[in-house]
Amino acid sequence: MTIDAQILSALRNAEDGSVSGGELSQRLGISRAAIWSRIEEMRSLGYEIEASPHEGYRLRNVPDVLHADDLLSRLGKTKVIGRDIRVFQETTSTNDVIEKLARDGVKEGVVVFAESQSKGRGRLGRKWVSPLRKGLWFSVLLRPDLRPQEAIQLMIAGATALARAIRDETGLSPEIKWPNDILINGRKVAGLLTELSAELDHVNYIILGIGVDVNLNASDFSSELRKLATSLKIEKGHSIDRASLAAAALRELDADYARITTGHFEAVSDEWEELCSTLGRNIGIRIGDRVLQGRAESLDSDGALLLRTQHGRLERIIGGDVTVKK
Amino acid sequence: MTIDAQILSALRNAEDGSVSGGELSQRLGISRAAIWSRIEEMRSLGYEIEASPHEGYRLRNVPDVLHADDLLSRLGKTKVIGRDIRVFQETTSTNDVIEKLARDGVKEGVVVFAESQSKGRGRLGRKWVSPLRKGLWFSVLLRPDLRPQEAIQLMIAGATALARAIRDETGLSPEIKWPNDILINGRKVAGLLTELSAELDHVNYIILGIGVDVNLNASDFSSELRKLATSLKIEKGHSIDRASLAAAALRELDADYARITTGHFEAVSDEWEELCSTLGRNIGIRIGDRVLQGRAESLDSDGALLLRTQHGRLERIIGGDVTVKK
């Protein structure tokens, strides 16, 4: 962790909410003057840090911006994901940034956030609206020892972890719509995009891209989108702390990634099935030009959807556009 | 086709071997002086082009270098593959070059050759020796409408097309060793590397990398490799025309790619099965840390190998290192 992250972490975890400059100086191994200078710097970014001669420093308020050090301090210790966090004010798409890092050989677990994306994208190159500081738009680099057809496990883990983080942070009840959407009250609030680079029998790397509509207002959506999409703010009636949700999402993702890499994908997929509103429903699914009708029965061990068609056949589906029948 | 390619093509296809400057000028729509200047340029590259006042131009000899225009003129008209050919004297790996082109949105079918590669690679990042002008090291960009697990079809097509081209150009009898090697008399003479960029249910692009040991001498191989690898020159006892083999390989590949994209993969895989020395044999196959033993029974409709294990189970294998039992 950087010095800033360590200071923020110490302030957050302080028992009575405050820590003296002397204690910080000792704990971090740098002078009181250096601590003071870092705190001044953070204040200039909008962090309200009170300093009193008796109590020391106290964190009063944090600005609604994503800041790598702040995210690191909130996240705490993870196994793989988020030990390296980078925040961009604007980028084309965080998946693009991660792809460059991947090709440069950067280690798995690095996370890239952008406050806004000029070319945010969903599945199959579809546009993803990503207005400045209203959502969480981020991507994670993973290098699991999987075959390409097992990559879907990571999307399952991503959706499960994200749903759990949203539920814990907001009290709302997110559902998963297969394969890559998170819904609240039937409208889409988040999506996942899984991209991979692979040889035929071996994944080189996987990029898990996540977009969450956190604090968008109804006016941020086009009239067409408004019927299908929502935000946590709209559902909850007030703004949500983006940094806190981001840290929760990374923490949950780290936990589920650990479950997958230690051979416990089944535990993840059991949880996924409980959250999934698509299972047990009659659905239509468009795969390219083909449309299949049937009942979504379950996931198989690789994470594919098993669809019982009208003709009684069981089809194994990797991806497609689902419409749930009423 | 470029002017140079058109001139070479006209000279190659001339009925009595020669074409007059006037005829070339008329056919290509440029002046005789311009034709003369292009021919001078080609001579400087090593092309022996005779000019006589009565007969016109005659192609006597071509140098053993790969030249995009020459390859285009030999290739003739193809549907997709090789309509854009680029030759590098040296590069890290032709797959790297194609990857950059792919990300820049270049159309499928572009082929990159390198006279030598500093970081030629085989499956799983293994090193591929690629000495200057002794082999064919090239990669093809493809953008088929396939799911990631169907990408293996392209390797099957690549191996089949390459085996056919080698057989037709040399009279030798190449065999395919599953999944990605071409053998002659039991030793490896060529290999294929298939890399893909994909979403979970949709391939963005596939890079088919091909390496053929054409004119390597025994001394070009390390003593360890010499037991396992060979070259067309070693097997045939004389040098092979690399450009002619390259054109043949692209032509055959174009034909097989057309078979796949029009839904006739089965015809390709039938031919593959006939060429494949792995099928019907007892093999050991190493997949990561796992070793399976059994009999290689057949390919399934996606191109995966069906292995009947010692315990009678049928396993579906996408990739691995095969050892054939005697």
Image: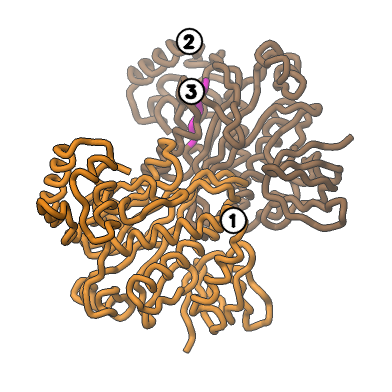
Chain colours: A brown, B orange
Mark 2 on the same chain as mark 3: yes
Q: Is any part of residue A49 visible from this angle? A: no
Q: Amino acid at mark 2?
A: Ser
* Mark 2 lies on residue: A52
Q: Is residue B26 left or right of residue A193?
A: left
Residue for point 51% across, 64% down? B156
Mark 2 on the same chain as mark 1: no
Is residue A114 covered in magenta? yes
In this orientation, which residue lies closer to the viewer: A212 or B8? Answer: B8
Measured as percent of width and height from the top left, residue B215 is found at 23, 70
Dot 1: few (<14), some (14–19), or many (≥20) neighbours within 10 Å? Answer: many
Q: Is residue A37 left or right of residue A226?
A: left
Q: Where on the picture, by quarter, is residue B27?
A: top left
Indicate the secondary structure of the residue bearing disc 2: strand
**Front label number (2 vs 1):** 1
In this orientation, which residue lies closer to the viewer: A134 or B68? Answer: B68
**Decide: marks 2, 1 in contact (CB < 8 A)?**
no
Real-space Cα distance between discs 2 and 1? 63 Å
Q: Which residues are magenta?
A: A111-117
* Mark 1 lies on residue: B149
Q: Is any part of residue B53 visible from this angle? A: yes
